[in-house]
């Protein structure tokens, strides 16, 4: 399975309300027709505060939404944006997007989210590795050491790691250079509410985890989001 995230910035002059209405009502049904699409979610940004994170925020990012599309593999993902069905979707982007950068990811469910019917909030976070830290080092520190820290956190409803394996900007089929899409991973974190999240971030284990982040992360850029399931 491959997960493609779109990192979306709304068109200048467009209100958040108009952006979200167009994304959900016009663009969503178009993208839902992609061949080979297994799932499609839209994550609308509701809060851009750093909220408990001691790291610097990434200067490259000021997002309004994340699209999330699932395909069986990378070839299926590329095929979906190579046919006739994709063409009107690309044209439609000009109506509500100023910029879209894309990352193809491997999803790792460190703490699987189980939707128990109770209230929850979701936060998505962009990670950029430190200069001098190789992609291989980043992968080891995040998928192994850091994940083991998070497994010890109390009252976490879910924690998924999406490690970037390819990047796109402009072209949807030709890889972009790292500097064009400077992100190495995307975190998905679920909490019961913001009060529970704030209480969690005051614990010693979270402090210890954030100390470990200094070993391999340059910037951490979180967003609280509201999710719409399209497919």
Image (tube, rainbow, N blue to C red):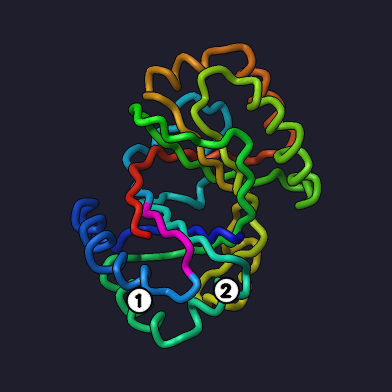
Judge whether 41 appears above or below 112 on screen: below
Judge whether 81 appears above or below 217 on screen: below
Left or right relative to 124: residue 14: left
Circle 1 crowding by C-alpha within 10 Å: few under 14, some 14–19, many from 20:
some
Q: Secondary structure at mark 2?
A: helix
Left or right relative to 165: residue 29: left
Of 108 and 87, the residue lying toward us: 108
Residue 65 lies, in percent from the top left, at 38, 52
Q: Locate the N terminus by quadrant.
A: bottom right
- At a point 71% along the width and 28% down the height, the residue shown is 148
- State the residue position of label 2: 76
Span colored in magenta: 37-42
Q: Secondary structure at mark 1?
A: helix
Q: Is residue 6 visible?
A: no
Of 27 and 231, the residue lying toward us: 231
- In the rendered image, residue 39 lying in the magenta stretch gets the answer yes
Residue 175 lies, in percent from the top left, at 63, 72
Q: Locate the C terminus by quadrant.
A: bottom left
Q: Earlier in the sequence, mark 1 or mark 2?
A: 2
Q: Main secondary structure of the magenta part?
A: strand
Q: Which mark is residue 89?
A: 1
Residue 106 lies, in percent from the top left, at 64, 54
Left or right relative to 53: residue 106: right
């Amino acid at each position: 399975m491959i997960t493609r995230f779109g990192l979306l910035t709304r068109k200048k002059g467009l209100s958040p309300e108009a952006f979200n209405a167009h994304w959900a009502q016009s663009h969503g049904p178009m993208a839902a027709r992609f061949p080979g699409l297994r799932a499609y979610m839209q994550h609308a940004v509701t809060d851009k505060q750093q909220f408990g994170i001691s790291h610097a925020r990434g200067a490259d990012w000021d997002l309004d939404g994340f699209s999330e599309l699932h395909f069986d593999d990378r070839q299926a993902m590329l095929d979906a944006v190579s046919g006739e069905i994709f063409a009107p979707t690309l044209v439609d982007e000009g109506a509500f997007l100023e910029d879209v950068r894309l990352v193809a990811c491997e999803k790792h469910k460190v703490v699987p989210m189980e939707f128990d019917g109770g209230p929850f909030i979701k936060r998505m976070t962009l990670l950029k590795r430190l200069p001098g830290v190789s992609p291989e080092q980043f992968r080891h520190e995040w998928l192994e050491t850091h994940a083991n820290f998070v497994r010890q956190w109390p009252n976490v409803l879910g924690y998924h790691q999406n490690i970037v394996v390819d990047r796109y900007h402009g072209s949807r089929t030709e890889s972009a250079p790292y500097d064009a899409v400077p992100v190495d991973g995307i975190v998905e974190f679920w909490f019961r509410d913001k009060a529970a999240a704030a209480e969690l971030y005051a614990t010693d284990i979270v402090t210890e985890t954030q100390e470990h982040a200094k070993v391999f992360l340059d910037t951490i850029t979180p967003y609280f989001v509201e999710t719409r399931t399209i497919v």
